[in-house]
């Protein structure tokens, strides 16, 4: 279809509205409660404070581990917000990237398959757990995924129409990927389209040259930044770039980072595709297993003769998955580019079950409706009865949920999800499998609304250190009184407290040569005394009794001075 028909289509605007309502309004409800989010956000804080948009220094002396595209977007959004970097402005780039990616997948797919398939693929993609989680986090991975997926989808659209992947928009998207997390942002999309072109019987020389030229052009703009950053950061910057981009791939990093076996990727895909993993598992009991005539040869021929979109999705899944099995460092977010393929195959599975086993769809709908109703009943029970049991973490969780003021928005989202769950159960008992599946997809969207507005903030806000940061600020720490932070692990910082104090905590590897106030973990204090006790005295000001969400130890405030 033409661009005009895409923009004027009612389905397009409905999808865009659903995505905006699902991902944008609740971004600021959950406080920073892990080290990953404030670590990224603090780079934007230092950009706005220092005016250094090339290689800003944060935490008293750290240069960024990644290229600055993500921090640039946060800083730009925060500048529009009056220069204040908040949870909302820090996460908004990820949410917008998710929306752009999903709309691009939908827009390209509707050219090559039925609109109902492309629309449902977009909804399944948006409601997959790993995708939703990444879209609501202040991390670079969703922005990187947007650049990679959008570039490869547009290249696929061009190749299907008999054109090479080289065009200005594609080059800019690939450049954006490189500027977000390094060369992988261009290498992986080009590897996917290169493999697809070969399977479509394009000449290998023409295919390789077109992909190579596209890749080289996409490195021009990033090369400018790398040159400017090297002039500013010197050898320290060079070592960091080599370690993060090549050391991580080859397993030669100076420290271990998320080291996992290859099958870890399979486990993360199964958990990341929830709740649709349940549908796939249920469908296994409806399949009649039998040997495929011809075995692997027949399966290979079916793949070679499949339609262009299916072949492209299979190759996208295979190339990305195999690529990320190579490095020893593996994380669930690395595999985000495969989720459009998984969403597409989930929709194909559902359409097949429409015809062959509608009962499986009803079973899946029943499970999801039960989950929604149970979650609502459990939340109401916790608010009313305020139970206390379990360890400290469980009590904090229950207390957080009990004290969570859902407000009108929370009441509406929970009520809508519960009502839709009952409506889904009605379709299970009185309707068709197709009706049950359509309703459960809508219910899943509503369940995410209540999850983001009530359940998640209630559980996670109790883990945040924002309250302690506010206390320290009231006592003058970070402004009148310089504040330092020391961790036994040289790679860890008090990121959350530093963010809420506006980048006023100076990370140190050794005690400052003068009298100073330092944040130290309860267990780390013993290591501090072991390393520096013969030269520096550490006087305990107070044990805050608050667990750091960065180093997972109780936070101690100590005064250190040379003996």
Image (cartoon, grey):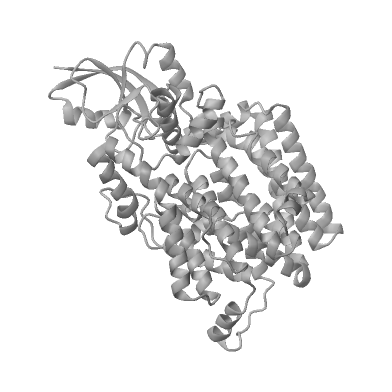
Question: Horizontal placement of 308 versus 328: left or right?
Answer: right
Instruction: Relative to 367, say whether 310 is above or below.
Output: below
The answer to whether residue 409 of the structure is visible from this angle is yes
Occupied quadrant, residue 26: top right
Percent across and percent down for residue 408 are 73, 27
Quadrant (top left, top right, bottom left, bottom right) of the N terminus: bottom right
Horizontal and vertical percent for residue 340?
Answer: 59, 58
Q: Position of residue 174 (x, y in %)?
A: 48, 52
The C terminus appears in which quarter of the rendering? top left
Q: Quadrant of residue 290?
A: bottom right
> Which residue is rendered at x = 59% and y = 46% of the image?
98
Residue drawn at x 72%, y 57% is: 2
Q: For the image shown, how many numbered marks are present on the structure?
A: 0
User: Percent from the top left, x then y, of residue 254?
Assistant: 25, 49
* Nearest to the observer: residue 519 or residue 335: 335
Left or right, residue 512 beside residue 9: left
Residue farthest to the right, as pictured: 430
Q: Residue at x 87, y 58 (%)?
A: 430
């Amino acid at each position: 279809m033409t661009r005009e028909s895409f923009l004027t289509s009612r389905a397009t605007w409905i999808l865009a509205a659903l995505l905006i309502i699902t991902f944008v309004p609740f971004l600021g409800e959950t406080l920073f409660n892990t080290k990953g989010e404030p670590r990224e956000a603090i780079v934007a804080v230092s950009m706005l404070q220092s005016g250094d948009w090339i290689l800003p220094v944060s935490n008293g002396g750290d240069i960024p581990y990644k290229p600055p595209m993500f921090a640039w977007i946060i800083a730009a959004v925060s500048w529009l917000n009056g220069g204040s970097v908040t949870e909302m402005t820090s996460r908004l780039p990820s949410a917008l990237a998710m929306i752009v990616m999903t709309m691009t997948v939908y827009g390209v797919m509707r050219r090559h398959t039925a609109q109902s398939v492309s629309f449902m693929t977009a909804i399944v993609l948006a409601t997959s757990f790993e995708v939703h989680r990444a879209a609501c986090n202040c991390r670079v991975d969703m922005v990187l995924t947007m650049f990679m997926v959008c570039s490869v989808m547009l290249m696929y659209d061009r190749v299907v129409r008999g054109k090479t992947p080289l065009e200005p928009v594609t080059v800019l998207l690939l450049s954006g990927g490189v500027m977000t997390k390094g060369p992988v942002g261009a290498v992986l999309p080009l590897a996917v389209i290169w493999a697809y072109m070969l399977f479509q019987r394009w000449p290998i020389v023409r295919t390789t040259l077109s992909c190579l030229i596209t890749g080289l052009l996409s490195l021009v703009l990033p090369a400018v930044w790398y040159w400017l950053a090297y002039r500013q950061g010197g050898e320290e910057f060079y070592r960091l770039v080599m370690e993060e981009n090549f050391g991580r791939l080859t397993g030669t990093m100076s420290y271990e980072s998320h080291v996992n076996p290859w099958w870890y990727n399979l486990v993360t895909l199964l958990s990341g595709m929830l709740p649709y993993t349940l549908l796939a598992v249920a469908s296994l009991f409806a399949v009649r297993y039998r040997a495929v005539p011809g075995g692997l040869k027949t399966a290979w021929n079916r793949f070679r003769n499949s339609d262009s979109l299916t072949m492209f999705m299979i190759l996208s899944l295979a190339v990305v998955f195999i690529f990320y099995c190579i490095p020893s460092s593996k994380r669930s977010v690395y595999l985000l580019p495969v989720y459009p393929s998984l969403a597409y195959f989930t929709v194909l599975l559902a359409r097949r079950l429409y015809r062959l086993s509608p009962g499986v769809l009803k079973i899946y709908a029943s499970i999801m409706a039960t989950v929604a109703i149970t979650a609502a009943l459990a939340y109401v029970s916790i608010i009313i009865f305020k139970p206390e049991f379990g360890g400290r973490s469980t009590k904090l969780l229950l207390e957080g949920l009990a004290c969570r003021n859902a407000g009108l928005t929370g009441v509406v989202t929970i009520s809508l999800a519960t009502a839709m769950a009952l409506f889904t159960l009605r379709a299970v008992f009185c309707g068709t499998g197709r009706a049950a599946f359509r309703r459960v997809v809508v219910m899943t969207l509503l369940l995410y609304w209540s999850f983001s507005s009530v359940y998640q903030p209630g559980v996670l806000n109790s883990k945040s250190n924002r309250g302690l940061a506010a206390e320290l600020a009231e006592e003058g720490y970070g402004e009148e009184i310089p504040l330092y932070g020391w961790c036994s692990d040289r790679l860890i910082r008090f990121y959350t407290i530093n963010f809420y104090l506006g980048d006023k905590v100076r990370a140190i590897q050794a005690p400052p040569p003068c009298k100073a106030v330092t944040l130290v973990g309860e267990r780390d204090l013993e290591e501090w005394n072991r390393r520096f006790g013969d030269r520096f005295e550490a006087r305990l000001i107070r044990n805050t009794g608050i667990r750091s969400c960065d180093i997972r130890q109780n936070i101690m405030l100590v005064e250190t001075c040379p003996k």
